[in-house]
Amino acid sequence: MNVSSSTVHRLLGAEGLYPYRYRTVQGLHPGDFHRGTGFCEWLLQQHETDKSFIAHILNTDEARFTRDGVFNSRNSHMWSGSNSHAIRPQRHQDSWSVNVWAGMLGNRLIGPYLLLERLMGHSYLIFLRDVLSDVLDYMPLAAIRGPWRISQANFSSLVHHWLDIEYVGHWIGRR
């Protein structure tokens, strides 16, 4: 077919079709929907029983920041009178990153903590046992009576076992 792109766009528009950009989202596994809705139902039930329940959940997460940062070429522009052939170097030969952990308990921020390595398995257990436990010792007992929500990215059987012993029935996560 010898049809110009403007003709194709005009015909698609006449049919009520418009171009949309893709948006990246978290990939899900088949059982995730049922686990997620089950968790939401459980959380709503807990909230009905105790209106302050959610304020006593320690939500935690970790992020890794690299030398390259985050760059979206679609939203970043170089304004100039002439083409400056702007570039943005990335994937440097000398790379570095910093890992940051933080938590929220009610309206309190816990951290952030700068970490030398990613919290996975054994290193996450050491962080929970040696760093976070000390921090929580200084929190009012009423603030930490509720459960923890543990990031699944850091989860291991070692962490699962330790949480079961130290915080019996007081942590939220895949079991």
Image (cartoon, grey):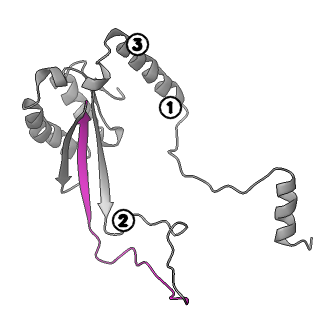
Residue 37 within the magenta-colored segment of the rendering: no
- Quadrant into which the C terminus falls: top left
Give the side of residue 138 with respect to residue 165, left or right. Answer: left
Point 49% across, 65% down: residue: 72
Q: Which mark sits nearer the N-terminus, 3 or 1?
A: 1
Callout 2 environment at 10 Å: few (<14), some (14 to 19), or many (20+)?
few
Compared to 105, does 90 lie above or below?
below
Spot the residue most to the top.
Answer: 49
Point 11% across, 25% down: residue: 140
Q: Give how far across and how far down residue 115 sits, in percent.
A: 19, 53
Q: Amino acid at mark 3?
A: Gln
Q: Which residues are magenta?
A: 82-106
Say what secondary structure mark 3 lies in.
helix
In this figure, which residue is indicated by the disc labeled 2?
69
Q: Amino acid at mark 1?
A: Asp
In this figure, which residue is indicated by the disc labeled 1?
32
In this figure, which residue is indicated by the disc labeled 3?
45
Q: Main secondary structure of the magenta part?
A: loop
Where residue 55 sits, quadrant-wise, is top left
